[in-house]
Amino acid sequence: MANYSPYAVPQAPPPKKTWRVVLIVVGAVLVLCCGGLGVGGYFLFKGVKEATGPALDAANQFVVNLEHGDTDAAYEQLCAGTRTAYTKDAFADGVAKQPKITAHKTTGVNVASINGRTTATATMTLTLDSGFSEQHAFPMLKESGDWKICGRPY
């Protein structure tokens, strides 16, 4: 005689895969978030570089012109207001009376656009022929699409 019971013996339920599903979902979310942060960071860096790069290039070129003693080229990089305040000869004379720049390092660039006027400030550490170094801020203005040095240039 066979063991026969009028009641069905319940089978053990199949093992739950809840943890595996949760881990897969959490992993997918992490991959998407990290990927999104990476892509967003890239475009943010690229946008900042596009905004500050031309101003930085103009400031570097101005200082390189001063390092090489090319005051005519440096004068051409001055904004209209500053050129009005200094003649070419007065600018060259003023530069000649300053310690000579032998090297420079950019420490920061800030670009702002307020009421349609785009300005920047490039901050540099200037190494002088006296052996001293000084921090100097170069205020800049975008004129006709080009960055120009304004204010007290050097």
Image (cartoon, rainbow, N blue to C red):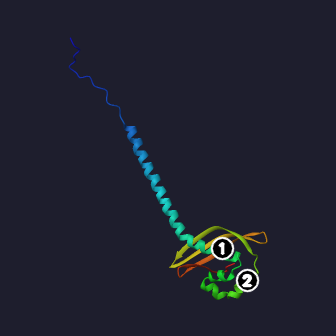
**What is the x, y in percent for residue 25?**
39, 45
**What is the x, y in percent for residue 11?**
29, 26
**Residue 27, placed above or below residue 139:** above
Question: Which amino acid, by three-letter code, is at mark 2?
Answer: Gly
The residue under the point 50% across, 63% down is 44
Horizontally, is 13 left or right of 99 in the view? Answer: left
Number of numbered discs on residues = 2
The residue under the point 79% across, 72% down is 130
- Secondary structure category for the residue under label 2: helix
Question: Which amino acid, by three-letter code, is at mark 1?
Answer: Ala
**Residue 125, placed above or below residue 153:** above
The residue under the point 42% across, 41% down is 23
Horizontally, is 153 left or right of 21 in the view? Answer: right
Q: Quadrant of residue 4?
A: top left
- Secondary structure category for the residue under label 1: strand
Sequence-wise first label, 2 or 1: 2
Which residue, as the protein is rendered here, is positioned at the far right?
Answer: 130
C-alpha distance separating marks 2 and 1:
17 Å
Foreground pick, 111 / 64: 64
Which residue, as the protein is rendered here, is positioned at the far top?
Answer: 1
Horizontally, is 21 left or right of 126 in the view? Answer: left
Q: Please identify, in this view, whether the residue under mark 2 or under mark 1 is nearer the observer.
A: 2
The residue under the point 60% across, 72% down is 57
**Which residue, given by chain and number where applicable, does mark 2 sit on?**
94
**Which residue, given by chain and number where applicable, does mark 1 sit on?**
137
**What is the x, y in percent for residue 18?**
37, 38
Q: Quadrant of residue 61?
A: bottom right
Tag 2: Cα neighbours inside 10 Å, few (<14), some, or many (≥20)?
few
Q: Quadrant of residue 126?
A: bottom right
Tag 1: Cα neighbours inside 10 Å, few (<14), some, or many (≥20)?
many
User: Which corner quadrant holds the N terminus?
Assistant: top left
